[in-house]
């Protein structure tokens, strides 16, 4: 390591230290990967040692993001309604409902319709009884402060998809054979291995991190730079998609308010903030933890290419998804948040 | 009274348990059969689309309780706010929509492999998890069954963690808390014509 301290022996301490830092922090093309591993090695024992945050505890809490509706009895429905509910099929049931200890009974109710096949409310009003606690009734988390901004941004992104991304992706789809599109998609997934590795390790998923590493090694070599996926086809090694947003969730960070990002689409505060740490280990964007300058201008190019290619494989998926929406923004918001909960659990 | 409840529920559990193993197996098999049936229909290129779709709906209808899905999506509170005519219209519009949406998703199917896992019993429900395998990625889809008057039927489908019923429920909550049943039905009548709803 050569350190130059200014001209002709003149002391320039700032300049000196800058040079030293640059040399030390920029260890080469795989710098980001090494730094990622280093960070992991530090974090791994810490993450495991945190007693107040057992693994996946947050995921468990998060499975009920919205306040569950209080038991039906809390609002004391009239006896007439309840009798109508059961249509005299299970009178025992209706009698029990009058008991004060309702919560316990609601639980029994679930077991009871397991036992009496024809006593299970299949239609009519009674069909709701044993289901109400399964679905959250609150439409939006109360902290949806950004509702109007999110709605406008959803519209903007929607227009961007139909006016820009879709025409370009359709053209790409027309030009490219399906096999090539899939290969390009696999190529990009393969080079994002550092993000998955780092986050698997940060979540103490050591086995998954090993599987990811094996996949990367096999697919980068035998799989011709990731264009093919022999790791799965021949060895059954599965990908374990993890990002820093999921890592934070596993550490116990809640999702925060939902935010629709320009171009990127639905996200929330936690996941949006987590984009930055992931970009530090993203080999497309950055091979240097400090400046990230070297590749940034190409990085966006790669990213845009990946997005267009991905859209070209999944043409029609968004349109089809959209048909399930009466009201697009809450639909996309809920789909995003529910899907994230699932990913965090995995 | 409490004692009776306890005893009866224990009894029910005791009596019901031996049945479960057989029933979950049966449901796994049933789901497998239905998926095979649907995939067969999708791969038959000699059928025109309307006939094919009609056959698919015919095949899955016995195991889907579309009415129950519709009601759960609306939620008890809003269902009971509707009069009978409104309820009937809601069911009609929504069930068609659910079926169309399902058929629409099937159009995206391109010969991926589908794996059906062992059914899981969760309280009085049975969840059958299926995986659509494409390129090292498994897309998870869970069919949730309940036992109604017509036997075991699906009341919710969870795709990649996203529950169909739950997402509709939130949307309906939003629409109904701002408007009334007639507004909702109007929106549904219109979106039936429009096919793809506008972004706002």
Image: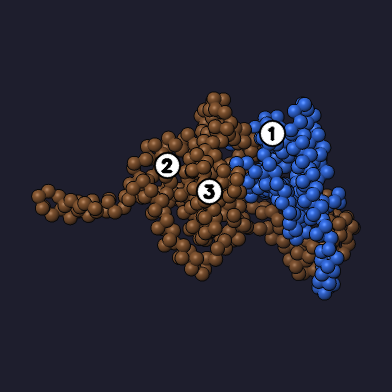
Chain colours: A brown, B blue
Which image quadrant: the C terminus of chain A? bottom right
- The numbered mark at residue A215 is 3
Q: Which residue is mark 1?
A: B107
Residue drawn where x is 77% and y is 47% of the image: B31
Depth check, mark 1 against mark 3: the one in front is: 3
Q: Relative to A92, is B41 on the left or the right?
A: left
Residue A329 horizontal/vertical position (percent): 58, 41
Q: Nearer the viewer, mark 2 or mark 3?
A: 3
When asked about the image quadrant of residue A317, the answer is top right
- SS class, disc 2: loop
Nearer the N terminus, badge 2 or badge 3? 3
Q: Residues within 10 Å of mark 2 (few under 14, many from 20)?
A: many
| Parent chain of label 1 | B
Which residue position is annotated with label 2? A284
Q: Compared with residue B6, is residue A163 higher up or lower down, i.e. above or below? A: above
Labels 2 and 1 positioned on one and the same chain: no
User: Of circles 2 and 1, which is in front?
Assistant: 2
Q: Is residue B7 left or right of residue B189?
A: right
| Circle 1: element type | loop
Is the same chain shared between marks 2 and 3? Answer: yes
Tell whether A61 sits left or right of B148: left
Q: Secondary structure at mark 3?
A: helix
Q: Respond whether the residues carrying marks 1 and 3 are from the same subunit.
A: no
Parent chain of label 3:
A
Can residue A137 be seen here? The reply is yes
Q: Position of residue A37 (x, y in %)?
A: 42, 56
Marked residue chain, label 2: A
Farthest residue in the bottom direction? B3
């Amino acid at each position: 390591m050569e350190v130059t301290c200014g001209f002709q022996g003149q002391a320039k301490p700032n300049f000196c230290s800058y040079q030293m830092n640059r040399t030390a922090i920029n260890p080469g093309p795989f710098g980001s990967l090494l730094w990622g591993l280093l960070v992991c090695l530090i974090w791994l024992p810490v993450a495991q040692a945190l007693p107040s945050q057992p693994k996946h505890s947050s995921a468990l809490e998060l499975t009920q993001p919205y306040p569950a509706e209080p038991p039906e009895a809390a609002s004391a429905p009239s006896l007439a309604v309840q009798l109508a509910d059961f249509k005299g099929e299970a009178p025992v049931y209706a009698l029990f409902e009058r008991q004060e200890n309702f919560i316990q009974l609601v639980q029994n109710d679930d077991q009871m319709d397991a036992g009496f096949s024809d006593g299970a409310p299949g239609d009519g009003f009674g069909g709701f009884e044993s289901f109400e606690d399964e679905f959250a009734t609150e439409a939006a988390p109360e902290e949806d402060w950004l509702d109007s901004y999110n709605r406008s941004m959803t519209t903007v992104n929607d227009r961007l998809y139909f006016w820009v991304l879709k025409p370009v992706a359709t053209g790409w789809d027309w030009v490219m054979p399906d096999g090539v599109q899939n290969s390009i998609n696999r190529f990009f997934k393969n080079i994002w291995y550092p993000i998955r590795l780092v986050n698997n390790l940060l979540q103490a998923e050591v086995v998954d991190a090993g599987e990811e590493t094996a996949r990367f090694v096999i697919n980068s070599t035998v799989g011709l730079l990731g264009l093919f996926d022999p790791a799965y086809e021949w060895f059954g090694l599965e990908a374990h998609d993890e990002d820093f947003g999921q890592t934070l969730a596993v550490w116990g960070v809640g999702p925060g308010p939902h935010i629709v990002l320009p171009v990127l689409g639905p996200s929330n505060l936690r996941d949006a903030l987590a984009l930055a740490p992931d970009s530090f280990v993203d080999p497309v964007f950055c091979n240097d933890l400090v400046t990230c300058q070297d590749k940034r201008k190409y990085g966006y190019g790669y990213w845009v290419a990946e997005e267009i290619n991905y859209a070209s494989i999944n043409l029609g998926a968004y349109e089809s998804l959209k048909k399930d929406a009466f009201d697009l923004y809450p639909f996309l918001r809920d789909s995003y948040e529910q899907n994230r909960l699932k990913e965090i659990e995995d | 009274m409490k004692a009776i409840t306890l005893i009866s529920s224990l009894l029910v559990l005791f009596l019901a348990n031996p049945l479960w193993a057989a029933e979950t197996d049966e449901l796994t098999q049933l789901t497998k059969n239905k998926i095979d049936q649907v995939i067969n229909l999708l791969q038959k290129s000699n059928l025109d689309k309307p006939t094919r779709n009609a056959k698919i709906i015919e095949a899955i209808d016995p195991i889907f309780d579309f009415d129950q899905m519709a009601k759960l999506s609306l939620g008890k509170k809003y269902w009971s706010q509707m009069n009978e005519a409104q309820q009937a219209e809601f069911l009609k519009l929504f069930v068609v929509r659910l079926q169309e949406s399902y058929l629409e998703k099937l159009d995206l199917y391109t010969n991926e492999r589908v794996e059906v896992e062992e059914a899981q019993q969760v309280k009085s429900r049975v969840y059958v998890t299926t995986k659509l395998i494409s390129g090292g990625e498994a897309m998870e889809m869970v069919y949730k069954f309940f036992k109604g008057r017509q036997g075991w039927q699906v009341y919710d489908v969870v795709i990649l963690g996203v529950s169909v019923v739950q997402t509709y429920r939130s949307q309906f909550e939003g629409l109904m808390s701002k408007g009334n049943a007639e507004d909702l039905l109007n929106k549904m009548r219109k979106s039936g014509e429009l096919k793809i709803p506008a972004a706002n």
